[in-house]
Image (tube, grey):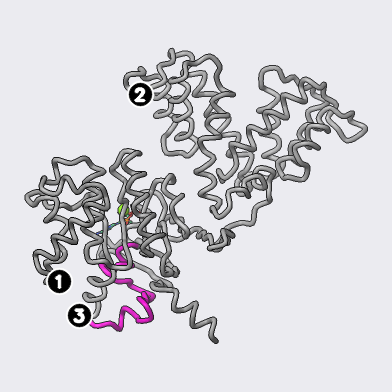
Amino acid sequence: MEEITTKYEEVIIELQSVNFIYNKGKDNAYQALYDINLKIKKNDFLIIFGPSGCGKSSLLNVISGLEYPDEGEVFVLDKKRSEMTKKDQVQFHRKTIGMIFQAYNLIPTLNVLDNVAIPQIFINKRKKEREARAMELLDKFGIKEYAERIPTELSGGQQQRIGIARTLINDQPIILADEPVGNLDSKSATNVMHILNRLNTEENKTIIMVSHNPENIIWGNHIIYMKDGRIEKEEFRDIKGDITEVNKMKQQDITDIEALLRNFQGLTKEQIRMMIAPMKAKILARAAIFDLEEDQHKKLEDGIRQRILNTINPKEFFDILDRPEERGGVELNARTAHKISEKVEEIIKIARISGDREKFSDDERASIVSKYISNQDGVSIQPDKFNNLRVLIKNRLNSEINRKEFSELLDKDKEDGGAGLNKQTAKKIAKHIDLILMISYGMT
Ligand code: ADP
Ligand code: MG
């Protein structure tokens, strides 16, 4: 009994079987949320992640009380929202929830200080008091010196910090943020994310943040992945750093790489995926090209990283390779740019297929990877040996043999269960497989 009570108290917002429809009953009715079940705990840093149009903002609005579910129930603290009076709801919202938006919603005719102080006018705080509190927050976020300026004189990152300061001034325990860094360059975005992180860890604020950018997942302890109005997958990490995964997540085999990554204690799989993207990019950049200037190499790696994470498409990746250096590109000649983009796209494709157990059977994955490998420079496989190679690759992709066993079996004789390849070829194949497994980690 004891335990159940404690656990229940920890949940501050709960959605049960929520359906939400825009323009219900009209010709243009549109169901934006399907059967949403979600428990948000005190001090969570929840990330609502998914592509544009999947229902993230709709979900946030249902959580905040701006929209009402058409079916299902929202509990705030332990009360059913549908049973709260209008007045209670307004009170709850005002006292409990602070909101941060992508467009900072600052008032252009007021100076920075007044923009931050404005929510306190509605709760009848005295001028002196609210200005002191606003100043304190501006100081905390490193924008005190701009207090007398008007918002448009400041950078995007600074304006978002004003937006956050304004949200915090009434000191609500729950902060809702809809794409708060969506408009910012990566440096300002990181700065703002650090602020949110500090609010979560040092001031125990519960943060509920919407993002379509996978690079922001790293900040959450509770992540939901949305698609077409539904929660597809949910991930948690607990205080000890153990990862529990629920909701339709398939149990995956532990690969060598995954075992290695256990060192990243306390991160979810998705967070690890983000963290190792630069490492993957480095390895792939090295495999794809030789002979580049330091600066060009950095830009190539950065482009590959974005491509691996699928935050840019093949065309955008090619443009980065092709574009002159002074415009942030790698400035390769057209032929080299084509060659590299083809190579990178191919290996990303193969890596994705190699781990996609849903779309491809074990045999299909093994065949595709084997064909890819036998077409690589310096690898030549006699037809009678191809099938043995394919079987070994299949076992390797399924983690039935480890890296060492795989390498040894490649050049062992057929009679001993090997592929009977020469040492040189065996070495090259082992390297290609390493690269594919590395790149594929966390892709599917
Ligand atoms: P996201 O924030 O993930 O981009 P939204 O929650 O804004 O997605 O929208 C989900 C779906 O609901 C989209 O298809 C969108 O077109 C639709 N939608 C959003 N707002 C409205 C509205 N006010 N009226 C009708 N449809 C809407
Ligand atoms: Mg949105």
What residue occupies the far right of the structure in this picture? Answer: 415
Is residue 83 covered in magenta? yes
Residue 153 drawn at (x, y percent): 14, 40
- Residue beneath the point at 39% across and 73% down: 12
Q: Quadrant of residue 371?
A: top right
Query: Is 8 above or below relative to 205?
Result: below
Identify which residue is drawn at 42% across, 53% down: 49
Q: CA distance from mark 2 to mark 3?
A: 54 Å
Residue bearing the label numbered 2 = 328
Q: Say which amino acid is labelled 3.
A: Lys
Dot placed on the residue nearer the N-terminal end, 1 or 2: 1
The circle drawn on residue 123 is: 1
Q: Is mark 1 within 8 Å of ligand 2?
A: no
| Label 2 near ligand 1 (CB < 8 Å) | no
Query: Which residue is labeled 3 in the image?
Result: 87
Residue 20 in the image: x percent, y percent? 34, 67
Q: Does the magenta run of residues contain 146?
A: no
Q: Amino acid at mark 2?
A: Gly
Label 1 is placed on what type of residue?
Answer: Ile
Q: Which residues are magenta?
A: 60-86
Is residue 25 in view from this perspective? no
